[in-house]
Image (cartoon, rainbow, N blue to C red):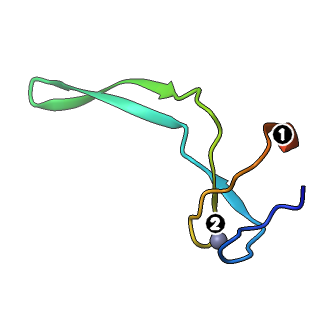
Amino acid sequence: MLYKCKKCGSKEFISQPNQYDVFESQNGKLVLKSTEFIDDELVLYCRECSEILEFDEDDIIM
Ligand SMILES: [Zn+2]
């Protein structure tokens, strides 16, 4: 499939941040507890206008 943003025509897409740090409140400090990865479905957004791209998982090349 030829992918481009249906709104602005851009051909570049960005994924959601899929990593986050967990901080825990401890005695008035914020202590980094762990870094977690969200192993979720891949969502892609247009880099220019943030429109969500509809795509076929089979077309993803990593
Ligand atoms: Zn766009």
Nearest the camera: 41 or 12?
41
Is 22 placed above or below 6 here?
Answer: above
Q: Name the residue under label 1.
A: 62
Amino acid residing under circle 1: Met
* Image-quarter location of ligand 1: bottom right
Disc 1 CB within 8 Å of nearest ligand 1 atom: no
Which image quadrant for residue 53? Answer: bottom right
> Residue 58: x percent and y percent?
86, 37
Q: Name the residue under label 2.
A: 47
Picture quarter with the C terminus: top right
Which image quadrant for residue 18? Answer: top right
> Residue 32: x percent and y percent?
33, 28
Question: On residue 23, which mark appears?
Answer: none
Total labels: the figure holds 2
Is 50 placed above or below 31 here?
Answer: below
Mark 1 secondary-structure assignment: loop
How far apart are the alpha carbons under marks 1 and 2?
18 Å
In the displayed structure image, the side of residue 26 where residue 21 appears, left or right:
right
Disc 2 CB within 8 Å of nearest ligand 1 atom: yes
Is 41 placed above or below 3 here?
Answer: above
Amino acid residing under circle 2: Arg
Neighbours of disc 2 within 10 Å: few (<14), some (14-19), many (20+): some
